[in-house]
Amino acid sequence: MVAAIAWWVWRELSQQAFDWQLAAHTFARLRWSWLLVSLVPIFGTYYWRALRWGVMIRPVKPRSSLANLLSATVIGFTAITLFGRPGELVRPYLIARKEEVPVSSQLATLLLERMFDLLMALLLFGFALARVNASGMAVGPKLTAILAVGGKLLGFVALVLVIVLFSFRHLAEPARRRITEALRFLPEHHFDRAERLVRAFVQGVESTRSDAALLLVFFYSAIEWAFILACYWCVVQSFTGIHLTIVDVAIFLGFIAFGAVIQLPGIGGGIQVAAILVLTELFGTRLETAAALAFVIWIMTFVAVVPVGLLIAVKDGLKWNSLRQIGREVPL
């Protein structure tokens, strides 16, 4: 991600003069009150994530502790910011330890959560595509290519997700057997771990067999993403040189969310790159202002949780090295 950001910024700076004075002036004119308000919805997302996780682990833990889930969620996202993708493993490990359930079951829950988040990202991206196509907005060359293939890719990924969720919800045992047989080529040690993970995933999907539970998971997912949208809107309001409506912000978030999870060509990795690209090519924002907004969004959505997460980790008796070790190796 860092390499992609560095390459993209270097190329843009080499092709046009970057006005550092304008960038500094943009930061100087920030409305800090809006940034403080943006903390409310972004921290609210962790609450809704914890509630959703509680629904998804009911097959292994019918009555989980919301406090345990919430603290593990905050620490987990702190670990992602500090350690990158290996930090993803911290949250399921901590929940497994706190709730006394198998780690494999929580890794499977993490996978299930990612699938629902991807569905929400697809819905947002579909909304963005529809609005851009209907409004006839002027689009830059890179986003034009994305729009050309975005609809087909959107439909394909959505279809795959629906098939996977439907198969595991209604045909869990046959699907488990087929996947297990397909993994027979793995060495015995790796096969055993993969089999346990598949079995745990099947068990986790059992939470969606109940229509009420499935609706609840979708409801919590929708609320979570509504809170993310609210955070983005507050951050945009803090910039005096950017004027986007709530619909514009939804389009902006749709492109960023889909680009981040699918790694679209031209967007690559990192919300910073995606944000700058969409702002400059779709909304005609100056590169300097777009770069400043992308940086602030990253700070508010990823970095702001770090102090809170570290405090909770210290309170729970966790140390920096222990979090790093969890991120490197989690037993199944």
Image (tube, rainbow, N blue to C red):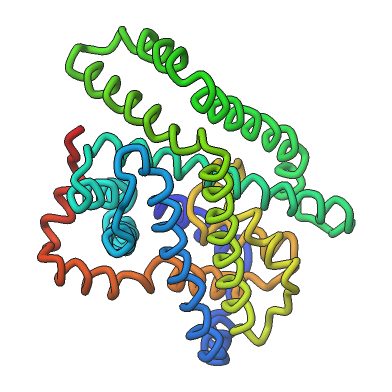
Is 27 left, or right, of 123 in this rendering? left
x, y percent for residue 193 = 23, 24
Check the image and report above or below for 171 versus 22.
above
* Residue at image coords 75%, 44%: 147
Looking at the rendered image, the quarter that the C terminus falls into is top left
Is 175 left, or right, of 123 in this rendering? left
* Residue at image coords 56%, 86%: 34
44 and 87: which one is in front?
Answer: 44
x, y percent for residue 297 = 51, 70
* Residue at image coords 72%, 71%: 246
Q: Is residue 327 visible?
A: no
x, y percent for residue 295 = 49, 71
* Residue at image coords 34%, 13%: 183
151 and 142: which one is in front?
Answer: 151
The quarter of the displayed image where residue 239 is located:
bottom right
Check the image and report above or below for 40 versus 29.
above
Is 108 left, or right, of 251 in this rendering? left
Number of callouts = 0
The quarter of the displayed image where residue 170 is located:
top right
135 and 322: which one is in front?
Answer: 322
Q: Is residue 103 visible?
A: yes
x, y percent for residue 268 = 53, 46
